[in-house]
Image (spheres, helix red, strand yellow):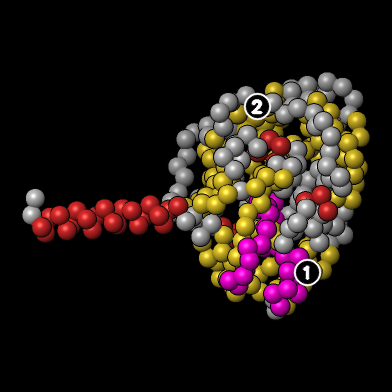
Amino acid sequence: MSLRACSRLLCLILLITTMAASAQDHTAPMELRHNLPFVQVMVNGKGPFTFGIDTGTGGQALVTSALVQELALPVVGEAEVGDPSGRNPKKASISKIATLTVAGVQFKDVNAVQFQPSPREGQIDGILGFVLFRDYLMTLDYPGQRLTLATGTLKPDGGKMVVSFTMPHDVPTVELSVGSRSIDAHLDSRGLGLSFPEKFADGLKFASDPIVLGRGRTVSNEFEIKGAQLAGDVRLGQYTFPNPFVEINPVLPLANFGAIPLQNFAVTFDQKNLLLRLEAKDKNIVIAAPQRRPAAASGIHPPASSH
């Protein structure tokens, strides 16, 4: 082999190695607390700080007032935040983040709405919203506890592992089949269980009478949550949830597909093509009754957006 050929081969090896290293830079450990995902984030070159990942938040990011003060983040406006019920919206300040880095990817000029985290979550500095990742394939790998950001697109497969979604208020919404009926559901990484609106649940059959689980809290409402085992199946794509334990809420108009069912999947979102891929070991997935609920639990953690 000639010296020139060897040189070209070496350059090719170096290029492949560099590309592999670059790809590795777009993945990061994902901590799970009560099945809710958290990652480490750099803000304006400082940190790391702990941020949750919330596909149910329509904005780019949320930050605590403590982080705003610590980093002297400038306030650039005001947002109206609330949940899908439309009841009791609130005002919150918007701060500007010059650079936000997660999994080796840097985002610039990020608008971050101030919020008050729940005590049940432990130490948290902010939340990364769904639309922050609109230019990437974002994978939340719950079994592998990894966040991955990549380029590319998803391809339809006839509704098996890859299903379509819509984005009302910039939140991913899928269609669940519940027996012979269907309902729209937020795919919400900070929701807890599989939840149905009270009006929809009134037409369902349950294995036993619903029981009170506790109090639920959104950014603008509090309400009582009930739960019971469904006498029937729920389906999403090729996956079936036989006789799942479901939550019933009296406030939110849509169903919520939260962290308890999501913990079985590596889920990839393609916002440009409005497709998502669900990968799990089994096609039949059990959602059992919770043994206990975390303190100050909110059965659903709904969107907080500036719309």
Rendering quarter of residue 282:
top right
* Amino acid type assigned to the residue bearing label 2 in the image: Ile
Q: Relative to residue 247, is residue 179 depicted above or below?
A: above
In the rendering, at what x and y percent does residue 156 appear? Answer: 47, 39
Question: Residue at the spot x=77%, y=69% of the render?
Answer: 66
| Callout count | 2
Question: Residue at the spot x=84%, y=34% of the render?
Answer: 292
Question: Tag 1's secondary structure?
Answer: helix
Q: Relative to residue 97, is residue 128 depicted above or below?
A: above
Say if residue 185 shows up in the picture: no
Left or right: 69 with respect to 295? left
What is the magenta range?
A: 43-72
The residue pinned by badge 2 equals 285
Which tag is nearer the camera, tag 1 or tag 2? 1
Upstream in sequence: badge 1 or badge 2? 1
Viewer-closest of 41 and 211: 41
Density class for disc 2 (Cα within 10 Å; few <14, some 14-19, many ≥20) is: some
The residue pinned by badge 1 equals 65
